[in-house]
Image (cartoon, rainbow, N blue to C red):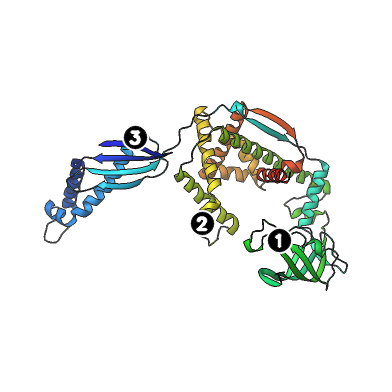
Amino acid sequence: MQVSVETTSGLERQMTVTVPAERIDQDVDKQVMQQARTRRMDGFRPGKVPPKVIKRMYGDAIRYDVLNRVVQESFYQAVQQEELKPAGGPSIDLKNDKEGEDLQFVATFEVYPEVELADFSAAEVEKQSAEIQDADLDQMIDTLRKQQAEWAEVERAAEDGDRVKIDFEGFIDGEAFEGGKAEGHDLVLGSNSMIPGFEAGLVGAKAGDELELDVTFPEEYHAENLKGKPAKFKVKVQSVSASELPELNAEFFAKFGIEETEVEGFRTEVRKNMERELKNSLKAKMKEQVFNKLVELNEIDAPSALVDEEIDTLRRQAVQQFGGPNAQIDPNTLPKEMFEEQAKRRVVVGLLVQEVVKANELKVDDARVQETIAELAETYQEPQQVIEYYNGNEQILNQIKNMVLEDQVVDHLLASAKVVETEVSYEEAIKPAQQVAQEAEAEAAAE
């Protein structure tokens, strides 16, 4: 077998493989003899069908099967011989498969990138810390009460925070536009769910009032035909409702799975949940920072085959998240572009994490795995049952092991990085890293 390899671009390789005709002929002859012994055919006793009859009748099909098998076997023998690591399956182009001549094919595929990890001591990361203040706890309980609030109609003028039921229709240059009309629409004033100026224009309105609101669609509005356009909305207020917050009692506590009868006990349980959320948020932000620095310091290409696999995973996750487990949505209908950048980053991070594990011979800490399982189980009513379930489910257990190994990689990298400790508020600490980045971009653009 002859093999030659050419680098076409980046990670892509073209490997030309030539297999001697003798190997193909020998394999075809073996298959012919096998079928002559086993195939039943009218006019011949079992096992007595002449090979030439088998070859005349089934030779083409036998040769096709042999070629497919030899191509697969030869490809994997060739990549081992050339010490290549394919990232995904190859595209095969048969150059010559004529009977009596050497088989030749060209396999096009991508390989895993070669990684030489940069010194992580050049990285600087921010380690945030935060404490939960009584004011934070009070605000959280207020938020929980608002989530369970009931609405009651009032006769007074609408105030910020009230809910109004309205009919409205929008016009641009005197013409009604598509999607600008609704009847019986419930709107909480101050929720910022409508375009700027709309909700503010309804403060002070009473049931039965009819108003005209002059507003302007934002330049970044999602509908291209409305971006930056001035509009007039005709609005009729059907009713005004104020929220009534529930009392802090056992009935209210039970809605959150908390079996307490006293306020102090409820506050203690809420604080525990806030502490868990705070810990997880700070940990996630630190991991995000470390992986961002790892990617910055190590520029590598992401094999497209792995990116495509990751895109498929993200598509399925999106369908499950927004459509539920019984969603009748084909994930492949979601545009590839929606997930491409995220998929590339996940692939690059995964490859770099694997390299850190390999280079430093890191092994998953089983004790840490059990600690993680116990922490996850704390949020359930029967923690011990959850612990036993996780340990008995190989798929979930492997996911937790991978998560713990990632945490160990983060700890290993942090040990050599420059860590700057900063204290922030609870509200700042629990903001997702993506939201913090978006706010920073917005501030920079405003300056």
Q: Nearer the viewer, residue 55 or 212?
A: 212
Q: Nearer the viewer, residue 279 or 298?
A: 298
The answer to whether mark 1 and mark 3 are in CB contact below 8 A is: no
Q: Is residue 276 visible?
A: yes
- What's the residue at 81%, 63% (across, down)? 201
Camera-nearest label, 1 or 2: 1
- Of callouts 1 and 3, the N-terminal one: 3
CA separation in Å, label 1 and label 2: 32 Å
Give the residue pinned by disc 3: 80
247 displayed left or right of 347: right
* Residue lying furthest front: 173
The quarter of the picture where residue 12 lies is top left
Give the residue pinned by disc 2: 331
Q: Amino acid at mark 2?
A: Pro
**Tag 3 secondary structure:** helix
Q: Amino acid at mark 1?
A: Phe
341 displayed left or right of 78: right
CA separation in Å, label 2 and label 3: 36 Å
266 displayed left or right of 65: right
Give the residue pinned by disc 1: 217
430 displayed left or right of 353: right
Q: Position of residue 124 (x, y in %)?
A: 65, 30
- What's the residue at 61%, 40% (across, down)? 373
**Tag 2 secondary structure:** helix
Q: Position of residue 358 (x, y in %)?
A: 49, 30
Q: Is residue 352 above or below residue 390?
A: above
* Residue lying furthest right: 156
The quarter of the picture where residue 77 lies is top left
